[in-house]
Image (cartoon, rainbow, N blue to C red):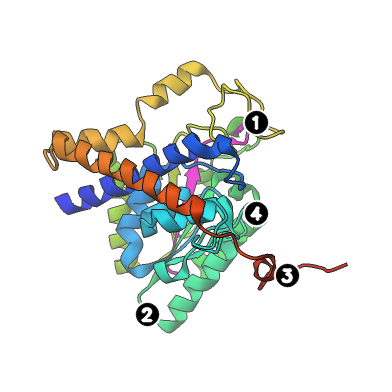
Amino acid sequence: MKKIFFISLLKKILIIRNSENIISKYYSQNEMKTPMHMSKGEELVVSAAVLTFLKNSDFFGYYRSHALYLSATEDMKSFFGEMYGKVIGENKGITGSMHIFNPKKNIKLVSAIVASTIAPAVGSAYANLIKKNNRFTVSFFGDGATEEGVFWESMNFSCLKKIPIIFICLNNKIAVDVMIKERQSYKINEIVKKFNLKTYTISSFDVLKICNVYNDASNYIKKHGGPIFIEANYYRQLQHIGVNDDFNNSSSNFEKKNYRSRLEHKFFAKKDPYLLIKKLVLEKKIISLKKLNSYEDNLKLKLEKIIKLVKKSKILKNATSTRNVYYENK
């Protein structure tokens, strides 16, 4: 992989992390009304996939969508417009944190309902197969989605029809505050390997190894077709909903605290994607420390200007906020 790849990867991860830092800074002001599902910890496994597959693929995401949206679009103004519920938001302020999408930039669908975007992703990929347009689909979902029947049905159909789709299971080994051992009697990758498809497992925090997995998957699907399954293990650094870690009082009414050990949290803090990508580009002399610091300082200033702009912008009028939204008028 060329230097430009890692510069682009660095840029995407810095945008995601600094944008979420801004959310944490201003969320207590209660102007961002959307519940926040933060991406801190998954920046690398998402951004590396987006960077590898962006040119000829369609993305289907899930509720933890910040990393996907920002790495695919790098559009911070539209992102924060959506977080603040303003007209200049990507989706006019209607979708918020969990449903933000942009079909023109290949983000076809994002939904808060567990496993709900997997079947549409398969449908999209099947259409690409029929059209023979050499495009493929990337379906992102959490490990909890494998507990739903639609996941296994989608896998089966994709293997049967040899559909050009890459399933990426973002496995943080926890659902809200319930550990994976307490809710799954199976190992995801072991069962998936029994299907007729190519499988990969990302269990390392090494930037190069992670990028190589996606690069190999890209070459494989171009040569042999799909489907492909990738289990991308990572560590979710914050609580399920909100801007705090698991050791503070939750911002939601159904999450516990202190359900993970502080020792574990401290260990994975050293495996932070934000630190790992900076370490790599500096060690390989892809960029100088001075340029890196300058870029990030300018990025922080740009984000502060965006926040000021977004706060002054308009909210969608009630008359148009329900357009194209189904509801029962009683």
In reply to whether residue 302 is colored magenta, the answer given is no
Residue 45 in percent (x, y) is at 38, 45
User: Tag 2, which secondary structure?
Assistant: loop
Residue 118 in percent (x, y) is at 56, 60
Give the alpha-carbon distance from disc 1 to disc 2, as whole Å. Answer: 43 Å
Whichever of labels 4 and 3 marks the residue nearer the N terminus, that label is 4
In reply to whether residue 173 is colored magenta, the answer given is yes
Which residue lies under the disc numbered 1?
182
Residues 199 and 29: in front is 29
Q: Residue 113 carries which label?
A: 4
Magenta residues span 163-179
Which residue lies under the disc numbered 2?
133
What main secondary structure does the magenta stretch of the protein show? Answer: strand
* Residue type at tag 1: Glu
User: Tag 3, which secondary structure?
Assistant: loop
Q: Which mark is residue 326?
A: 3
Looking at the image, can residue 205 be seen? no
Residues 208 and 259: in front is 259
Whichever of labels 2 and 4 marks the residue nearer the N terminus, that label is 4
* Residue type at tag 3: Tyr
Q: In this view, does 247 lie above or below 276?
A: above
Give the alpha-carbon distance from disc 2 to disc 4, as whole Å. Answer: 30 Å
Whichever of labels 4 and 1 marks the residue nearer the N terminus, that label is 4
Q: In this view, does 109 lie above or below 62?
A: below
User: Tag 4, which secondary structure?
Assistant: loop
Give the alpha-carbon distance from disc 3 to disc 2, as whole Å. Answer: 33 Å
Rate crowding at label 1 as few (under 14), some (14 to 19) or many (20 or more) other CA atoms within 10 Å: few
Looking at the image, can residue 76 be seen? yes
